[in-house]
Amino acid sequence: MAEMTPDTTHSAAVAADWSLDPADAGAYERVARTLCTGGHGHIDNPEWVARARDAWEDVPLPLRRAVRRFRRHSGPNGTLVIGGFPVDQAALPTTPTVPGSVQRRPTVPAAVLTMVACGLGEPLAYLAEKSGALVQDVVPVPGQESFHGNAGSVPLSFHTENGFHPHPPDYVIFLCLRADHDRQAGMRVAGTRQALSRLTRASRQALFAAEFITTPPPSFGPDAAASEHEVEPRPVLSGAVEDPDIRMAQFVTSPLTPRAAAALTEFGRACEATARTLRLTPGDLVIIDNRVTVHGRTAFHPRYDGADRWLQRTYVTTDLRRSRDHRPDDDHVLAR
């Protein structure tokens, strides 16, 4: 796997870290297709997820090895980009344009995402977001251009996924089915392992203090703002001082003290200075270590002609057991 050099400007584009060779891509597609036939034809059915978990063992070894290594240590960027996954452009339906679009029926792309999720841990979803679907569409929606979330097309600021929640995902996986028409949309990623070296000691200490409030993102709907999860102040950084975990979303994280405000601003500048921009093409799969990496998006111009940018997304937890009190019937959806 080639080592990537981080961008020093947010406009530079980064290609895949490596790509599946055609033979391995074909083998992966054959395994994925087995999940699109037979019984249990519902992605959110625990039995279908169990089939995907078993099928992961049948995919080519180079992919399983790369995912295993990334799971052990996600590297300086906290991001792995793999190209060459099977996406049949001719067979794709039109890009969805409705709010809350998700995937419920098995497809090859959904099977690709779910198998990789099982290689990292277990897929996870939140009932209040995208109706609790395990595989979600990230698409521009007419009338929601300025929405600060997955349905918008304005710039999306740096964030970790669902940092307000007691059980945020450990990883986020995206699969590109279609790029935007003008190739303007870029996924921006910045790892704390690089950004921290640009912070003063005082800012690092402030970010470890419980002096921040993070509320649910707009994708959770207006009722989520009054939920139990926003009440308790939390630190932005936690864990090992030399390699901390992060929970932060520039749009919904509010500092409670002057030093917290200064530290959050400094951290934002550090993320800007170390960010990479990923210009995804169909078949590119991105794994983001949500514990140590923030991500965002550049602006783009949707046409709503059925061929707009289309990503699919899945969350992953490394320990499903720790959220058991939030998951009725021990399935993969957190009900609160």
Image: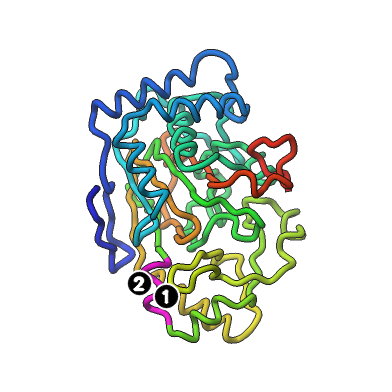
Question: For residue 58: magenta?
Answer: no
Give the mark count. 2
- Between 214 and 280, the one lying in front of the other is 214
The local crowd at label 2, few if under 14, some if 14 to 19, many if 20 or more residues have their Cα within 10 Å, is some
- Between 10 and 153, the one lying in front of the other is 10
Q: Are marks 1 and 2 in contact (CB under 8 Å)?
A: yes
Q: CA distance from mark 1 to mark 2?
A: 6 Å
Three-letter residue code for mark 1: Arg
Q: Is residue 179 left or right of residue 320?
A: left
Quadrant hosting residue 333: top right
Residue picked out by circle 1 = 269
Which residue: 75% across, 54% down? 223
Which residue: 66% across, 79% down? 256
Q: Position of residue 88 (x, y in %)?
A: 35, 26
Q: Position of residue 130 (x, y in %)?
A: 63, 42
Asked whether the viewer can see residue 234, the reply is yes
* Disc number placed over residue 33 in the picture, else none: none
Residue picked out by circle 2 = 273
Magenta span of residues: 192-199
Q: Main secondary structure of the magenta part?
A: helix
Q: Position of residue 180 (x, y in %)?
A: 38, 44
The local crowd at label 1, few if under 14, some if 14 to 19, many if 20 or more residues have their Cα within 10 Å, is some
Three-letter residue code for mark 2: Ala
Quadrant hosting residue 112: top left
Q: Residue 72, relative to residue 31: is it above or below?
A: below
Which residue: 36% across, 64% down? 275
Q: Residue 227, relative to residue 256: is it above or below?
A: above
User: For the residue labelled by badge 1, is the local secondary structure a helix, a strand or a loop?
Assistant: helix
Asked whether the viewer can see residue 182, the reply is no
Q: Residue 224, relative to residue 261: is it above or below?
A: above
